[in-house]
Amino acid sequence: MLAGAVALWLAPGGTTLLAWAALVLVALAIDVALAGSPRRLSVQRTTLPSVRLGEPLDAAFVLANHGRRRVRGIVRDAWQPSAGATPARQPVNLAAGQRRRLVTTLRPTRRGDRLADHVTVRSLGPLGLAARQTSLRTPGHVRVLPPFTSRKHLPGKLARLRELDGRTALRVRGQGTEFDSLRDYVIGDDVRSIDWRATARRQQVVVRTWRPERDRRVLLVLDTSRTSAARVGDEPRLDAAMDAALLLGALASRAGDRVEMLAMDRRVRARVEGASRNDLLPRLVDAMAPLEADLVEADWPAVVSQIRSRLSRRALVVLLTSLEAAAVEEGLMPVVHRLSSHHQVVVASVADPQVAAMAGRRGDAYAVYGAAAAERAGLDRAAVVAELLRSGVDVVEAPPADLPPKLADRYLALKAAGRL
């Protein structure tokens, strides 16, 4: 079309303009007519496995040309932007009857189910002036699992668990411990652990050693209400709570305990129960993957009712929720005694490091007001923690990276003290 400017310069006038426009339209029509039909293509996707957040995955599909003309052009695999599909477009050159396998690399940036709706094909004519385009509906699906970044702490926690499990003798006595073995008394042993019958038989003082109980029940409760939607650092509070739940679940299952999971706000969002030791982690990450926090208040009386309906014996109940003063005082606090009177309850909460940093700023008036607000929030949170402790509830609060190991340490401490 730009070349037509030369013709207009040599022979100016409307006739030249119309003639050149007609020539261009004829060239376009010929190019479109000679282009291979993209509607004669078919797409077949391969089934994709699950992938952890941040890890790459190759999503392949087979493009087949059932037409009589070559299809030369561009293909775009239309995944959601959060699927991180690269390259965005790929060249294609398919002769009649030919098939080709194309690969799109996915690097998801969000947890959950990432979807693809169609594959778009643009078939260029032999002159490269025009193209025919169509979208072939080819649904695709990949489940993006939580990254479980805290698994790096698992070997160290398992080493401590083995010490508690009898490889290193325990000299503790308390409710909820199992008898392990007999050994000679040494200075410093608890006299309540003396086995008087064995002492009489051996003619020397003998004490019992104890180990943490196995086959206890651990229920992980994920709060998916509005407080879990708040972002702490680069991720929602819910994601950090999931990471802590996965580490504790893996540790407790290795300890021989039965681990279950319940995700709930005003209704049950996900549930895992009856999982074996080898099947627990896959089922946990699969159930957690599609969870998103809902902008509603948690119905704590309903949550407590769900817990009590599932647990008939004493168990460890871990509530992964926020310590936001208003939400706890109005929702959890009035009903938490119904749990703590029958179960060992631990409230685990993600702390926001930015709030602590804000409390120390004094640069200008705006920073001072921010520091005052942060201090006020800290005092309210401390009051809530004190009230929970008076109700017999253990509280673990830490930044996202520190919460999983701290929660695991609290579990090991409770197990060592025989409080499970």
Image (cartoon, rainbow, N blue to C red):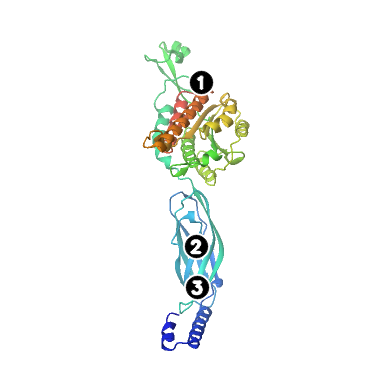
Determine contact: label 1, label 3, CB under 8 Å.
Answer: no
Task: Decide: is 201 above or below 299.
Answer: above
The residue wearing badge 1 is: 175
Mark 1 → mark 3, Cα distance in angstroms: 75 Å
Q: Contact (CB < 8 A) between labels 3 and 2? A: no
Which of 41 and 162 lies nearest the eye of the viewer? 41
Helix, strand or loop at mark 2? strand
Q: Return the disc, 3 or 2, that comes first in the chain's sequence.
A: 2
Residue sitting nearer the eye, 32 or 21:
21
Q: Which mark is residue 77?
A: 2
Q: Secondary structure at mark 1?
A: loop
- Report the label total: 3
User: In the rendered image, is residue 217 in sight?
Assistant: no
Front disc: 2 or 1: 2
* Three-letter residue code for mark 1: Gln
Q: Residue at x 44, y 54 (%)?
A: 107
Neighbour class for label 2 at 10 Å: few (<14), some, many (≥20)?
Answer: many
